Amino acid sequence: MARRKIAKRADDYAQWYQDVIAEGQMAEHSMVRGCMIIKPWGFGIWERIQREMDDRIKATGHENAYFPLFVPKSLFDKEAEHVEGFAPECAVVTHGGDKELEEPLFVRPTSEAIICTTYGKWVESWRDLPIMINQWANVVRWEMRPRLFLRTMEFLWQEGHTAHETHDEAKAEVQTMLDVYAECAENVLAVPVVKGVKSESERFPGAENTYTIEAMMQDGRALQAGTSHDLGQVFSKAYGIEFQGRDGTMQHAWSTSWGVSTRLVGALIMTHGDDAGIVVPPKLAPIQLVIIPIYKGDEQAAEIKPDVEAMMTSLRAAGVRVKADLREYLRPGPKFFEWEKKGVPLRVEYGMRDKEAGNVVLKRRDTGEKQIIPMAELASVAAPLLVTIQNDMLERARARRDANTHVLDDYADFKSRVGDGGFFHMRWCGASACETKVKEDTKATIRCLPHASEPDPGPCAICGEAAEGVRAIFARAY
RNA sequence: CGGGGCGUAGCUCAGCCUGGCAGAGUGCCUGCUUUGGGAGCAGGAGGCCGGAGGUUCGAAUCCUCUCGCCCCGACCA
């Protein structure tokens, strides 16, 4: 009876996070420190995120391609800020077979170096632009403090890399992709996000500007869920993307890059999970409805099972991803727990009691709400209910985010409240000294300057100097 | 890389202080009984006690070294 249990969120949020991943069979640690084995259930969710993102990436005019894992060190060295930012966390290959390499190869932490260099070869004229390519790949960053999905040494992501004729066109691309990320996060993952621009200290190494979608986890900490970078001409100059313009002059292209990673799965878990386990939004659930048959003995089984088959047929016809848990060696109880921990949105219980009444029991994972409905109506009830659940999950997450978002002017007030979590909108003069002070005082950082805010001039909450623009969002982050 | 902790059955751990047959719970296998929220009984399989050296008649236990992992800090999608 001493089964493994999941820590309560309120008691130990970090432990809870690890427990729900283990119990929900999402992933586990590998034999290689910092690396993650993504199990079928977790990977199934990631595959659906991928598919949704990929559709949107293609719908906005991009094509997929694939570039190599290894980057020659000399290529990496071409952009100073970029090197400085990434070199400390790069894995480096020094040997091929048993021979030492003449030039070490970096395992890509991101692919600007190799992709921009390639673009340089492809581009001669303004007619070759824009180049709009995305790749799905793994990247490696030598992290010291790994956490499943949130921060692993190797992770999966997509990275889009585009090159344009004008800065305006590149800027538009950066915003388009930020919008795609935000729309997908909200409508598919049911994770509400704040779009905004990063401060200089949080910028991608080498970028002119970094834009972000920031989500709020249930413990009130922020999670950067996706980024889109305006690289200006920095990488074009470093890696030689030059073209002859309409006016006949040689010009450097304007490039962008943007990415989301398996970290989104972590965002999903920490946005929707509850004390019983993970809760998967219907659009991402590999199984949307699980049927648990209940019977005693072979005779009852013979009565129940055909009905289960019929239910599956009608549910499939209604577009519901359904599974019947027919394992003979488990009683219904353990099955309930297992699918609950995995976060399957809907559960049907069906036994003799229901058969005699012509009903089924339908239970929502997100609210725990149970209803008894005629079996004949199952498909017509379940399909729209999945839509309702998807919407409700987003609305609950949005309400929680909004309830933990505060507008503050008093720095002392902020310091006393930041530990409780939440987003704090405060005036900021733009000085990195103020940012550093906040980080030292409270471990909080500026998550972004939100796009949706209006300028709100007044004294900087930290130093009192004039702050002209929008209020910055301060929060502790993952 | 600093500070702390832990390596014993698939998993969680006891045993170590005070040296003397390798343990528990859970999981797993077989059979029977069970089946509407983590079933019961019976039988069974499963170990180089992280690794190497040392002390000792004898080491999971004491000593030295080593490797690995976890947690807390500095870094990060």
Image (cartoon, rainbow, N blue to C red):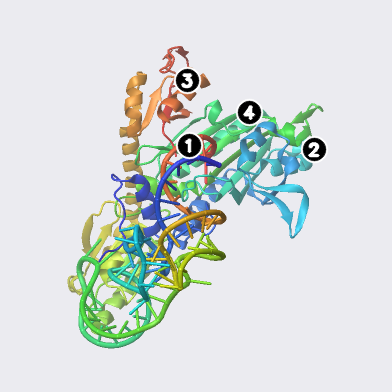
Q: Which residue is mark 1?
A: A213
Residue bearing mark 2: A124
| Residue located at (62% from left, 40% from top) | A88
Separation of residues labelled 1 and 2 (CA atoms):
34 Å
Between the C-alphas of marks 1 and 4, the distance is 21 Å
Residue type at mark 1? Ile
Can residue A23 be seen at all in this image of the molecule? yes
Q: Amino acid at mark 2?
A: Glu
Tell me which label, 3 or 4, sits earlier in the chain.
4
Image disc number at residue A168: 4
| Quarter of the image that includes the N terminus of chain A | bottom left
Chain label for disc 1: A
Mark toward the viewer: 3 or 2: 3
* Both labels 2 and 4 in a single chain: yes
Indicate the position of residue A202 as horizontal and vertical percent values: 53, 31
Checking the image for residue A43, the label placed there is: none
Q: Determine which quarter of the picture holds residue A408.
A: top left
Look at mark 3 in the image and give the residue it sits on: A434
